Amino acid sequence: MKLIFWGHARERMQERGITIKDVRLTLLHPDQLDVDKSDHHRLLAKRLYKNSRIGARQLLMVVYEVHGHAIEIVTVVSTSKIDKYI
């Protein structure tokens, strides 16, 4: 799968210590998959993971669009508010 990262996604990944591997694993093995309520062309993959930067269990959410054989990563969010989003 070809991943294309929007600039916004790359900025958020750098700020939050999220790796490309974290994003790829979330896309391949999501704990939950939803359609974005504000834009039905966007999907939202969610996965529990250990954020290596802070050493804590968090929820990783990847907002993306599928265009042919490419997946465009719009943004990523890492949060400790797991119950709020699952």
Image (tube, rainbow, N blue to C red):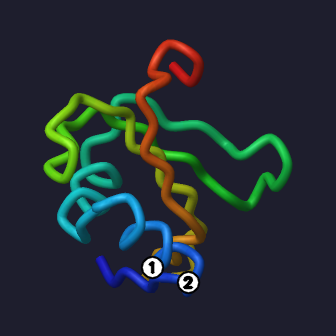
- Residue 3 position within the rendered picture, expressed as x and y whole percent measured from the top left: 37, 80
Q: Which residue is painted at 48% across and 67% down in the image? A: 12
Crowding at mark 1 (Cα within 10 Å: few <14, some 14-19, many 20+): some
Against 56, is 82 above or below?
Answer: above
Question: Foreground residue, 19 or 42?
Answer: 19
- Quadrant of residue 15 within the rendered picture: bottom left
Question: Residue 6: which disc?
Answer: 2
Which SS class for mark 1?
A: helix
- Residue 23 position within the rendered picture, expressed as x and y whole percent measured from the top left: 31, 60
Against 55, is 70 above or below?
Answer: below
Q: Is residue 29 left or right of residue 71?
A: left
Q: Amino acid at mark 1?
A: Arg
Question: Foreground residue, 56 or 49?
Answer: 56
Q: Amino acid at mark 2?
A: Trp
Against 52, is 2 above or below?
Answer: below
Question: Residue 10: which disc?
Answer: 1
Q: Which residue is painted at 32% across and 32% down in the image? A: 58
Q: Is residue 3 left or right of residue 57?
A: right
Question: Residue 41: which disc?
Answer: none
- Asked if marks 2 and 1 touch (Cβ < 8 Å), the reply is yes
- Residue 4 position within the rendered picture, expressed as x and y whole percent measured from the top left: 44, 85
